[in-house]
Amino acid sequence: MSKSQWYSDRWGEPTHDDRMLFLLLTVGVFQAGLSWQAAASKREVFERNFCGMDFRKVAAFFPEDIEQIAKDPEMIQNRRKIKAVVQNARAIVLLLNDYDSFADYLWDFVGGVPVLHEYETAEEVPNTLPEATVIAKDMKKRGFTFVGPIVTCMFLKAAGIMQDRVWDS
């Protein structure tokens, strides 16, 4: 499957898979300053560098691991974002003290059902939503980083937790 095909097929498909959610969150972290599609095209690089998106393993990374990842020529060269992925993995591990899974935590905000927002035109689709702002604040409180309202909104849309329907398309 091509990189753009994966992005097209994956976007908005509801998932309860913690590894996929961690991957989509990682794409969200790296897309800040880029397009979501540009960051998503690095999926294989992320999977290779972040232990197949096993957040438990990533949570145990040391500074040397971060430096090694930063040396990968295919990796987006931003140490702050690499560190953010490790921090987010640690936050997910801590979250498991209160929830059975990362998915349970996220889907609990919406009662287990995707939230559908409908718009007349594509221009009306906002880059953030009130629900995303609430979730972003809670994630930050729980130790996540690089999860502002816009990144969180895009992440939730990519994970199918929030969905947009545009009627003019």
Image (cartoon, rainbow, N blue to C red):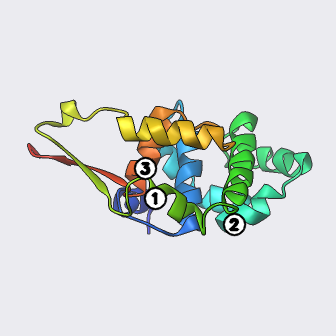
Dot 1 alpha-carbon crowd within 10 angstroms: few under 14, some 14 to 19, many 20 or more: few
- Which of the two labelled residues, at mark 1 and mark 2, occupies the earlier sequence position? 2
- Which of the two labelled residues, at mark 1 and mark 3, occupies the earlier sequence position? 1
- Name the residue: 43% across, 66% down: 15
Measured as percent of width and height from the top left, residue 2 is found at 44, 63
**Residue 1, above or below 28:** below
- Name the residue: 58% across, 61% down: 102
Rendered image: mark on residue 54: 2
For the residue pair 98 and 46, the one nearer the viewer reads as: 98
Q: Select label 1 or label 2 by which is in front.
A: 1
Mark pair 1, 3: CA separation: 13 Å
Q: Is residue 35 visible?
A: no
Mark pair 1, 2: CA separation: 22 Å
Mark 3 secondary-structure assignment: helix
Name the residue beneath numbered marker 3.
Answer: 156
Going by the numbered disc 2, the residue's amino acid type is Asp
Mark pair 3, 2: CA separation: 19 Å
Measured as percent of width and height from the top left, residue 38 is found at 49, 44
* Quadrant location, the N terminus: bottom left
Mark 2 secondary-structure assignment: loop
Name the residue beneath numbered marker 1.
Answer: 108
Q: Is residue 114 visible?
A: yes
Dot 2 alpha-carbon crowd within 10 angstroms: few under 14, some 14 to 19, many 20 or more: some
For the residue pair 54 and 131, the one nearer the viewer reads as: 131
Side of 76 where 111 appears, left or right: left
For the residue pair 129 and 12, the one nearer the viewer reads as: 129
Quarter assignment of residue 56: bottom right
- Name the residue: 33% across, 62% down: 113
